[in-house]
Image (cartoon, rainbow, N blue to C red):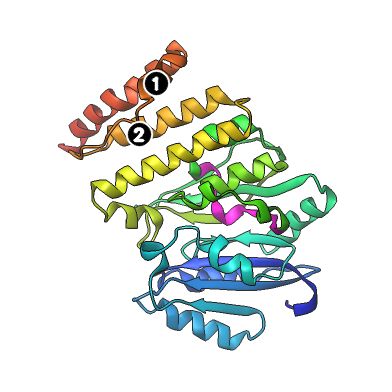
Amino acid sequence: MSEASNIKVSICCVTYNHRDYIRQCLEGFLMQKTNFAFEILIHDDASTDGTTAIVREYAAAYPGLIRPLIQTENQYSSRTRAIVTTFLLPISRGEYIALCEGDDYWIDPLKLQKQVDVLDKDPGVSLCMHNSIVVFPDGKRKVKKIYRESQQALMLDIIRRKRIYWPTASMVYRKALMDDYPDFCLRSHVGDSPLILYLATRGKVYYLQEDMSVYRKGTPGSHGKRLRANDTSGQQKLIETELEMLDRFNELTDSRYNYCFVMRKLLIQSSVLSRRNGFAIKVYPGFREDFKQVSFTDKSLLLIKIYIVPLLRGRFCKR
């Protein structure tokens, strides 16, 4: 439903070469049952596989509800990675922003209503998220959940948990908070990580223990796939911008969560080192000093990731 003068939620969808998935994504938006008006904004990043035609088809079928922004030049590779913040937020009309990429989809028709109810009830909540079902390339499914029941998310978990535990398709947040979005967040190669951290510094993050979306891991056109198509310099740039982002958030929070930020940096570096496959990935300058700060248990975890995991992976892959 959509009434231009009284839109409560702007659903922002970024898509690129998602021909096989975009219909299911859009149907997940259209099935939402709410007592408020919402709009659907779609940014097609110059798709070449027929995705654009599908987006135009849906926009024609639902005029006023679906508003497409069709690019003729790929913005991800030429200008910016913060697509939603740069292109969709300025034209959005909702009080709240809901995210879902074109290869993911929603499975609960009351998802938006449930999350808006949380935000309306408590003005101190900046972001509402929920469980997600992860579908891997081999077809296997796994529910990624952090808590056994709905509750306020802990900052320690937000910092240290992998991105897969904080699915983009589960996010609904207050648009007004984005007026002060830091420039260093816009430089990050992964847009959802700094967004979650930023919103966590501006209010409470509430986590609903319900499976309401599906995240497809490793699909064509995804960030991971596009990054792996780059050379070593692209991998290095990703690491550098993410580490810079973590350092800046550490400063922004007056080092209250210093250990968690340090450990997150070490985990990122160790993860890349464990799967470098011959690439000459540089260790960031403060790696050794940060490594000295963490506990013996965490040191052991990092060393296992860097040295033992690759050996085991190589042994089993040869069989």
As drawn, 26 above or below 147: below
Quarter of the image where one finds residue 212: bottom right
As drawn, 116 above or below 91: above
Please give the residue where the numbered disc 1 appears in the rendered image.
301
Question: In the displayed image of the protein, which residue is found farthest to the right?
Answer: 121
Q: How many marks?
A: 2
Quarter of the image where one finds residue 251: top right
Callouts 2 and 1 close, C-beta under 8 Å: no
Quadrant of image for the C terminus: top left
- Say which element carries label 2: helix
Residue 171: in magenta span: yes
Mark identifier at residue 67? none
Q: In screen coordinates, is 71 left or right of 172? A: left
**Residue 102 seen in this snapshot:** yes
Q: Position of residue 149 (x, y in %)?
A: 70, 37
**Residue 161 seen in this snapshot:** no
Residue 243: in magenta span: no
The structure residue drawn at horizontal position 27% and vertical position 34%, both measured from the top left corner, is: 282
The segment highlighted magenta reads 164-175
Q: Position of residue 41 (x, y in %)?
A: 59, 72
Earlier in the chain: of badge 2 and badge 1, it is 2
Residue type at the position of mark 2: Ser
Q: Position of residue 293 (x, y in %)?
A: 46, 15
Please give the residue where the numbered disc 2 appears in the rendered image.
271
Residue type at the position of mark 1: Leu
